[in-house]
Image (cartoon, rainbow, N blue to C red):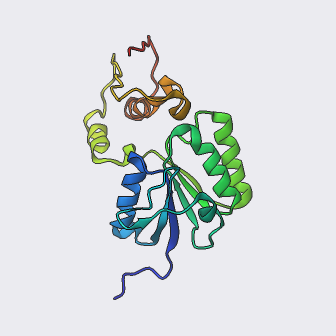
Amino acid sequence: MNTEPERKFGVVAVGVGRAGSVRIWDLRNPHASSAFLNLIGFVSRQELGSIDEVPQISLEDALSSQEVEVAFICSESTSREDYIRQFLNAGKHVLVEYPMTPSWVAAKDLWELAEQKGKVLHEEHVELLMEEFAFLKKEVVGKDLLKGSLLFTAAPLEEERFGFPAFSGISRLTWLVCLFGELSLVSATLEE
């Protein structure tokens, strides 16, 4: 029995930071559920040539190529909206890392554009699919979060590329909301 899918969707990864590198690795080492995806290349503002034998292609080539049908947007938060819009307007499906954009209004506009174009726009919070999250979800069933604090310990982020400081921790807040439901903020501080 041939397990190879009859048709594979051509995919390009946009951005090669942490998320983009993981996407490229996953696409090069697919699980059975993603065997219908064919990694065509990656787009980066840096001149890299190739990564693990995956070729770099220009944004223009990715947008115009008939072979590229899906874009995985893995760039920093503030550039995602522009990339999503370009790929949707070029007739491509888009998968984007969470959060799609710092602006709810912009996100709503992008959903409407995808619908107009008849394309899939999928926002994925990959952390919520991880084993660690599934474990936590089981552990907190029936428990209430009475008080807690969220400590964001990553390196300083460039606000113009990654959004305002609180936005950088929004994925951690999403974990807490998914685990415990509605939260209320008591206070917030920023230390450098």
Is residue 71 found left or right of 150 in the rendered image?
A: right
Q: What residue lies at 35% left-to-right and 59% top-to-bottom?
A: 25
Q: Position of residue 28 (x, y in %)?
A: 36, 66
Q: Position of residue 185 (x, y in %)?
A: 46, 16
Q: In which quarter of the image is the N terminus?
A: bottom left
Q: In which quarter of the image is the C terminus?
A: top left
Q: Taking the image as drawn, is residue 162 in sight?
A: yes
Front residue (pair 125, 21): 21
Q: What residue lies at 40% left-to-right and 59% top-to-bottom?
A: 24
Q: How many labels does the image show?
A: 0
Front residue (pair 130, 22): 22
Q: What residue lies at 36% left-to-right and 53% top-to-bottom?
A: 22
Q: Position of residue 31 (x, y in %)?
A: 34, 66
Front residue (pair 159, 147): 159
Query: Height in image: 51 above or below 146?
Result: below
Q: Position of residue 163 (x, y in %)?
A: 54, 30
Q: In which quarter of the image is residue 108?
A: top right
Q: Taking the image as drawn, is residue 30 in sight?
A: no
Query: Height in image: 134 above or below 53?
Result: above
Is residue 190 found left or right of 136 in the rendered image?
A: right
Is residue 63 found left or right of 7 in the rendered image?
A: right
Q: Which residue lies furthest to the right in this view?
A: 116
